[in-house]
Amino acid sequence: MTSGFAVEMQDVLKQFITPEGGILSAVNHVTLQIKDGEFFSLLGPSGCGKTTSLRMIGGFELPTDGKILIHGKDMSQVPAFQRPVNTVFQQYALFPHMTVEQNISFGLEMKGVVRSERSKRVSEALEMVRLPGMEMRRAKQLSGGQQQRIALARALVNKPEVLLLDEPLGALDLKLRKEMQLELKTLQREVGITFIYVTHDQEEALTMSDRIAVMSKGVALQVGKPEEIYERPANKFVADFIGETNFLDGVVKGQNGSLVEIELTGTGTVRVESSRKFTNGQQVSVAVRPEKLRLNADIQEANHLKGNVENVIYIGTDTHYGVRFPGGQKARVREQNITQAHKEIAIVGDEVTVSFTRTSPRILTE
Ligand SMILES: Nc1ncnc2c1ncn2[C@@H]1O[C@H](COP(=O)(O)OP(=O)(O)O)[C@@H](O)[C@H]1O
Ligand SMILES: [Mg+2]
């Protein structure tokens, strides 16, 4: 029996020789277990090793060390074309003068699938990507979004166990990209295939994924559900990369059970709940999201810090207030514009109180 995991990366290392003759660890001892039927994203900035990880799963690169398993089977000796995976790239590379049907069935033809079976599978694949009856169109006559769907159909027609997608929506404009995000997610649920999705766009990863691995410099820093990654980032990099975070630096003054007292440098003392144990004098960062801060609000059992408004930015749904505290630390407060008669809570120069509950922040040390 298999492990229940579609794909496992076991302590995978991939090194490249740089043009200067040095060694670059593009993927640096990554261990990941991707569940069957999961929509799993590799998220991180450019150059963090996402594509290299995907290429090793697909068999286009071999690990320098470590193992890749697909459904429990070691892939070391299995060439790319024999792996039960297919890849969709950002550059979808359709043959422009060929018809949609020819583009999709190309791979099936190579495999020797008979014509009647081919056309049946092509029309099924076109149904899946919501372009039924498009067989006879030429690829170059299609819009960017339609071409991306054809590229997807071309991958799905092979009935892979795992679909690898490398920034497949990167070439589309924002509105179309958002539509396709939801469609891809729906499609993935319908077909039940494991998707491994590479993106540098945190919002995209949050929207689509069952779980996310946040990568930086070849290392998987945190793996979890979108809400875990967002609400409980493991370190400053993750807190900063996913959404927006205020970091208020300070020193631990004491801890009473789960309640930690922290003196924020030049700003004031706050109390924050944490399950971790800290030592007195320890340097920490209180990380708190802008939407969890309130301006001039009367909240019980909360922390209150006085500061001055430096800037006010109205962005329609919300208004952002940049607040500077006496010691020079800053925070951004996001207030939702709920009522129709929008009225600013404060203007530039006003003295304000920034409040947050004891459970809102995370205390981060790295
Ligand atoms: N074939 C290669 N030879 C040398 N360096 C490479 C090669 N492929 C990728 N790299 C390097 O490995 C790092 C990770 O690249 P990549 O996996 O493409 O990142 P991402 O997809 O996250 O942007 C980068 O520094 C990149 O320059
Ligand atoms: Mg890449």
Image (cartoon, rainbow, N blue to C red):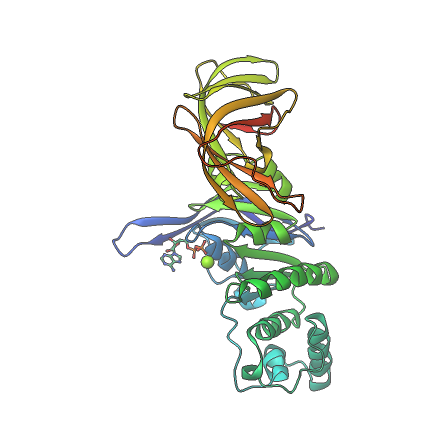
Determine whether 352 is above or below 260 in the image: below
Residue beneath the point at 62% across and 78% down: 104
Q: Is residue 265 left or right of residue 295?
A: left
Residue sitting nearer the eye, 241 or 117: 241
Q: Is residue 334 visible?
A: yes
Q: Is residue 73 visible?
A: no
Residue beneath the point at 53% across and 56% down: 198
Image position, residue 205 (x, y; %):
58, 51
Furthest residue to the left? 20
Image position, residue 119 (x, y; %):
70, 83
Q: Is residue 201 left or right of residue 64?
A: right
Image position, residue 133 (x, y; %):
71, 82
**Tally of numbered discs:** 0
Residue beneath the point at 61% across and 18% down: 258
Q: Which image quadrant: the C terminus?
A: top left
Image position, residue 201 (x, y; %):
52, 53
Residue sitting nearer the eye, 163 or 42: 42
Question: Quadrant of the rendered structure where residue 356 is?
Answer: top right
Residue sitting nearer the eye, 72 or 23: 23
Determine whether 112 is above or below 55 in the image: below
Residue beneath the point at 32% across and 54% down: 17
Residue sitting nearer the eye, 329 or 350: 350
